[in-house]
Image: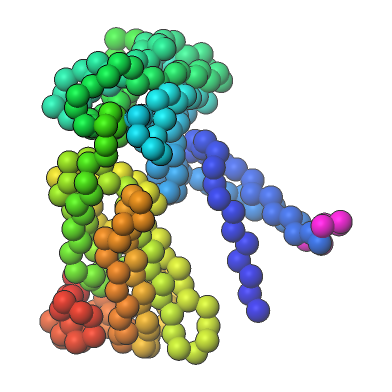
Amino acid sequence: MRWWPQAPLEMSLVDGQYDLNLQVSNGRRTMLEQTFPQTLLVDAFRALDTRIANLGPGVTLEPAQIELGRVEGTQRMLTIEISNYSEDDQQIHLVPRDHLGDPMSRLMLSKSKFDLAAGRSKTIRALLRGISKTSSQWGTLDVIRRNLNSPNDVESATSLPLELVHQQRPVLNVESGPLQWANLAGGNAFVMEITNQGEGYAPIQGELLLGRDDGSRPHRLLDGFGRWLAPGQKRELQFHVPADLEAGKYQVRLSVRSRENLAVEEQVVVLDLTEDMLVGTGNVADESAELSRVVPGGATVR
């Protein structure tokens, strides 16, 4: 029996060399310990950017998605932490704007422009102030970063999702396209396009279970990770299958959900994954026809 230890990654990361130390114990003594050298790239952790925003080499901001409000489930004040892991002093400028580009006057920051020394962190308080007749607002917190060695040049400009809920959250209206099989540059995947037709941000969480009927443990494939989708925005969810996946008949159980556990898409299908589909060769039209017979809605192969 194989066991794959897993643990959430909740700390800030910057690109570089790391040592991953794994210890297995029975609660009293260490039974196994091994260290694995790792080269980590922040962009490789698709779930991390829903919590920690990378502002450029060595500079991070947390949280990466900001909501303030007066309704249940929201808070009027939160703290924003900016960390500088680089070797240079930085200047940070925070500018909250609504989706039309106008300033969000109801959001107050304890400091909007400041210098941040190398190796240091700074905490900023964000507060929802006053009463607004507007039900809610959505926009961005624009973060402008300058290296103090060349302060006249903008090193990076990042826009983070920002939503103010004054009276009530907008009604969710998220639409999904057909589930498709795709041979992508990074490997094979099931893909689905998601569109936010609502008037506020919609967090997206997708899970796809891919299993066989031989009693083996199904593969659990994730995408979305709660990342907010802006009104009018489209995103393709990609559920990458293991590179060593064998051809055969599989059951696919898909669940895509949003805020308040709203079901965006749920389906269970059985399909045959052929060798041609897995290696990305053969007649695409034939593959499309084969998949269409088993996937509701006539999904196609890309």
Q: Residue at 19% across / 27% down in the picture? A: 134
Q: Is residue 169 left or right of residue 14?
A: left
Q: Residue at 27% across / 83% down in the picture? A: 276
Q: Is residue 286 left or right of residue 161?
A: left
**98 in magenta:** no
- Identify the image's colour scheme: rainbow, by chain, secondary structure or one colour: rainbow
Q: Is residue 42 left or right of residue 259?
A: right
Residue 224 at least partly seen: no
Question: Would you place residue 257 above or below residue 273 in this image?
Answer: above
Q: Is residue 282 left or right of residue 73?
A: left
Question: Would you place residue 120 above or below residue 7 in this image?
Answer: above
* Highlighted magenta segment, given as a residue range: 27-32
Question: Would you place residue 32 above or below residue 292 in this image?
Answer: above
Q: Residue 84 at what x, y percent from top left?
A: 49, 23
Q: Residue 270 at what x, y percent from top left?
A: 32, 84
Q: Considering depth in this image, is 201 or 60 the residue closer to the camera?
A: 201
Q: Quadrant of residue 135?
A: top left
Q: Residue 265 at what x, y percent from top left?
A: 27, 65
Q: Residue at 18% across / 82% down in the picture? A: 292
Question: Would you place residue 107 above or below residue 233 in this image?
Answer: above
Q: Residue 114 at what x, y percent from top left?
A: 41, 10
Q: Quadrant of residue 94?
A: top left
- Give the position of the N terminus as an image quadrant: bottom right
Q: Residue at 23% across / 32% down in the picture? A: 136
Residue 119 at least partly seen: yes
Q: Considering depth in this image, is 69 or 176 the residue closer to the camera?
A: 69
- Give the position of the C terminus as an image quadrant: bottom left
